[in-house]
Image (cartoon, rainbow, N blue to C red):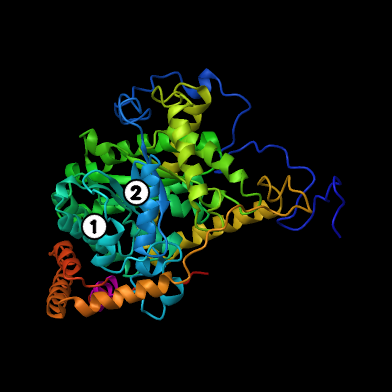
Amino acid sequence: MSTSAGARAPSDQIAGAARAEPPEPSTSTPSGIEVPVVVTREMAGDRDIGAPGEAPFTRGIFPDGFRGRLWTIRQYSGFGTAEDTNERYRFLLEGGQTGLSVALDLPTQCGLDPTDSMAKPEVGKVGVSLSNLAEAEILFDGIDLSKISTSFTINGTAAIIYAMYCAVADKQGVPRAKLTGTIQNDILKEYVARGTWIFPVRPSMRLIADSILFSNDQTPRFNPISIAGAHVRDAGATAVEELAYTLANGIAYVEELLRRGGDVTKFARRLSFFFYVHMDFFEEVCKFRAGRRLWAKLLEERFGVTDEKARHFRFGVVCGGSSLTAAQPYNNIVRVGTETMAAVLGGAQSIFTCAYDEAFQIPTEFSAEIALRTQQIIAHESGIARTVDPLGGSYYVEWLTDRMEEETRAIIEELDDYGGVTKAIEDGYLQMRIAERARDRKRAVDKGETVIVGQNFFRREEQTDDFGEVFRLDPKAAEKVREKYDAVLARRDEAAVARSLAALEEAAARDDVNVMPFLVDCCHAYATVGEMVATLKRRWGEFQEPIRL
C-alpha cells in the first residue's frame, strides 16, 4: 500500500523505494578510511609537499597546471553507422569539443563481424560498428587526424583498431608521427571487469606489448595504452582498489615490455591511465594526487627509472558511469558537475563527462551538449583551473592523500605476494575480490546505508520520472551496416586479403616478431576485424574464464 502525498514511508521498505530518514553521515570514506572530525597540522605532517612539475609530482606533472593548456575536452560517443557517428562528431567539434572519444559496438569489441550470428542483435547498439577500413574512412571523413586527438575505448581488438586508425591516416596522407590520442588497450582489466577479452592472458600481453613498441616508433605522440581502473571501479571496486589494481596492472605491462626488449625510459613516457570519478569529492581528488606520487615512486623503486617525464602519471577520466541513476535522471547533471570539479582539482589531462541520460540510453544531442557545457563552464567560469593544485596544503587533503597512498601500496604488495596480477587473473582470484566488493556495494544501497538521492532516499512514492527526450537509433542502422560490409567484400582484392592474413598468422606464431605491421597491412587490404581475430585465434586460442567458489 502506497503512502499518501507528504507522508513518510517506513524506513524498512524494499530496495529502491523511498525511505523516511537517511542515515547519519558516514565517518569513513567509501574505501573504508576512517576520517577524523578534524585534521590538525600534526596529523597532516608538517612537511614540504613539493612543487608542481617536480618529482614525485603530488601537486601535478606540469609546473603551470591548466594555465598553459586546459585538459582535453571529450565526449564519449558512437552509435549506429559510421555516417551517424561522424555526424555526431561534427556536432560536438562545432560545439567546442577538443578531442574525440570513440564508442565501439560490442561486436567490434569482441572481434565479431556484423554478419556473425552472435553479433546481429548488437550491431550499432552501444557504439559504432567498425568492421573494416572502409567504415573507419567514413567515421573520420572530413576530420583532419593531424589536428584532433582521438581516444578509443577498445581492448580485446585494440591493436586491430589502432592499426585501422594508422591506415586511415595513411589514406588521408597524414604522417603517422602527427597522430595524437589514446587507445585503451588494457586487457588485464577486461578479464576482471568488463569481459570483452578474446585471447588467453599471455598472448594478449604479447599483443599489447607489440602495439606499444610499434607506437613508440611509428606514432610517438600517440598513447598506445590507457591502463584503466575505470571499469574495475564500476564493477564494484573502491577508489583505493581501483587505484591499486590499475597501478599493479601498469607494473605487469612494464614487466612484459621489458621482457620484449623495450627501453623503459622510452615506453614509460607514453603509458597513460584512465579512471572513473565518483561522488566522494575529496577521496577522488586525493586518489589522483596519491596515484601520481606512488607511480613515480614505483617506477624508480622497481625499475630504476629516474627520467622525470618517464615517471609522469598522465591520466584521463570519465565523470559519470555507475554513479548515475535512471531514477530522477536530471540529478545526474549535478553529479557530473561535482565529479568534473574533482577531476580538475585532481589534475586530469583528459576529461569526458557523461550525459544525464547515459544511465538508460545513448545521449541525445541535447543531453550531450549539456555534458559538454559542464566542462566548459568549469573551465572558463569557475576559476578552479586558474592555479595549480589549489587544495594543496589543506590538512585534510594531505592527510587523506597519504592514507590513500598507504592503502594502495598495501594492496599492490598483497598482489605481489600472490604472484602478480597475471596469476591472480588466471586463477580467478582478482575476479572474486571485485565481485565480493560489488555485492557489498549493492547491499549497502539496498539497506539504505549508502544514500543515493532520488533512488533510495528523497523520492516521492507517486513520482513518475521524466526522462526527457528519447534517443531513437535508426531501426535500419544494422541493416545498412551489413549491406556496406557485403559491398566491401564484393569489391576488395581477395588475393591481397588472403596474403595479408597468411602473413599475420605466420607472424603470430613467432614470439620474436611484432604483429602490428602485419595488422596494418591487413587493414589496408580491407580484411575485416572478424577475419583478423579468427586468424589470431588459430594460433593463440581463446581465454577460458576460471570458475572460483
- Say what secondary structure mark 1 lies in: helix
314 in relation to 422, above or below:
above
- Inspect the magenta stretch and tell me whether residue 203 lies in it: no
Which image quarter holds the N terminus? bottom right
**Image position, residue 287 (x, y; %):** 45, 38
- Which residue is nearer to you in this view: 84 or 520? 84
534 in relation to 308, above or below:
below
Q: Which residues are magenta?
A: 529-538
Q: CA distance from mark 1 to mark 2?
A: 13 Å
Q: Residue at x 44, y 65 (%)?
A: 428
Q: Quadrant of residue 372?
A: top left
1 and 2 marks in contact (CB < 8 Å): no
> Does the magenta stretch mainly form a helix, a strand or a loop?
helix
Circle 1 packing at 10 Å, graded few (<14), some (14-19), many (20+), is: many
**Image position, residue 47 (x, y; %):** 41, 19
**Image position, residue 158 (x, y; %):** 29, 60
Q: Is residue 532 left or right of residue 177?
A: right
Circle 2 packing at 10 Å, graded few (<14), some (14-19), many (20+), is: many
Mark 1: amino acid: Tyr
- Which residue is nearer to you in this view: 39 or 78? 78
Q: Quadrant of residue 33?
A: top right
Mark 2: amino acid: Leu
- Residue beneath label 1, please? 165
Q: Which mark is residue 101?
A: none
**Image position, residue 103 (x, y; %):** 39, 57
- Which residue is nearer to you in this view: 398 or 529? 529
Q: Is residue 406 left or right of residue 468?
A: left
Q: Is residue 43 visible?
A: yes
304 in relation to 255, above or below:
above
- Inspect the magenta stretch and tell me whether residue 537 lies in it: yes
- Residue beneath label 2, please? 100
- Say what secondary structure mark 2 lies in: strand
